Image (cartoon, grey):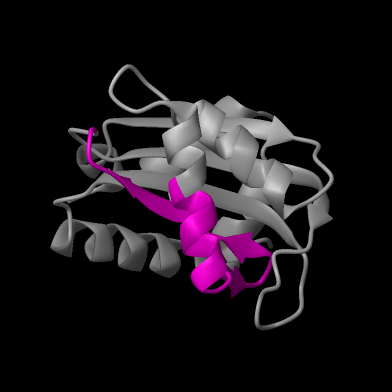
Amino acid sequence: MSLADQLADVRASLLNVADREAVLEVAADLLACRQAGADDLRASLQAREKLGSTGIGHGIAIPHGRSATLEAPRGVLLRLQPAVDFHAADGQDVDLVFAMAVPDHYTQQHLILLSELAERFSDAHFRAALRDAPDAQSMRKLLLDPSQPPKAAA
């Protein structure tokens, strides 16, 4: 099942913020919907981040949280300029973020989504394509349309 099939809504945005807390704040605002407010989502994202950094290396972070009121997962893809410190294990600042909120009852599905995202972001060509994308719409298409994988540079 593709990311597009698993997520109720995915947005993409280009963002200029100062630090990790600001990233989580903007992500919560973008994830918010009639079912789950920004304040609750922000608290969930921050609580998860306090358990350990969601920076997975190579300039990527996947902050994620849960909501008792969400009916389906939601996500937002952010490209940060400049990159910010997410306290990733590799010490590299983060410039690509996929923030996600899932319903509380999504236990196995949550792990599947995280695994699929980590796999996609492990591809250096995919990361480069996201970083080179001209706009948020192009980034969203790259993320959600696996039929158009990024091509290696010649």
Q: Give coordinates of residue 15: x percent, y percent.
A: 73, 35
* In magenta stretch: residue 116: no
| Quarter residue 59 falls in | bottom right
| Quadrant the C terminus occupies | bottom right
* Residue toward you, 48 or 153: 48
Q: Residue furthest bottom?
A: 90
* Residue toward you, 131 or 79: 79
Q: Is residue 17 left or right of residue 137?
A: right
Q: How many numbered callouts?
A: 0
Q: Is residue 114 left or right of residue 123?
A: left
* Residue toward you, 51 or 82: 51
Q: Give coordinates of residue 11: x percent, y percent.
A: 48, 29
Residue placed at 56% from the left, 38% from the top? Answer: 27
Q: Is residue 9 left or right of residue 18?
A: left
| Quarter residue 85 falls in | bottom right
On screen, residue 118 above or below 70? below
* Residue toward you, 43 or 146: 43
Magenta range = 44-69
On screen, residue 47 above or below 78? below
Residue placed at 15% from the left, 64% from the top? Answer: 108
Q: Give coordinates of residue 83: x percent, y percent.
A: 80, 54
Q: Is residue 154 visible?
A: yes
On screen, residue 10 above or below 47? above
* In magenta stretch: residue 55: yes
Q: Is residue 141 visible?
A: no
Residue placed at 35% from the left, 62% from the top? Answer: 114
Q: Give coordinates of residue 61: x percent, y percent.
A: 58, 61
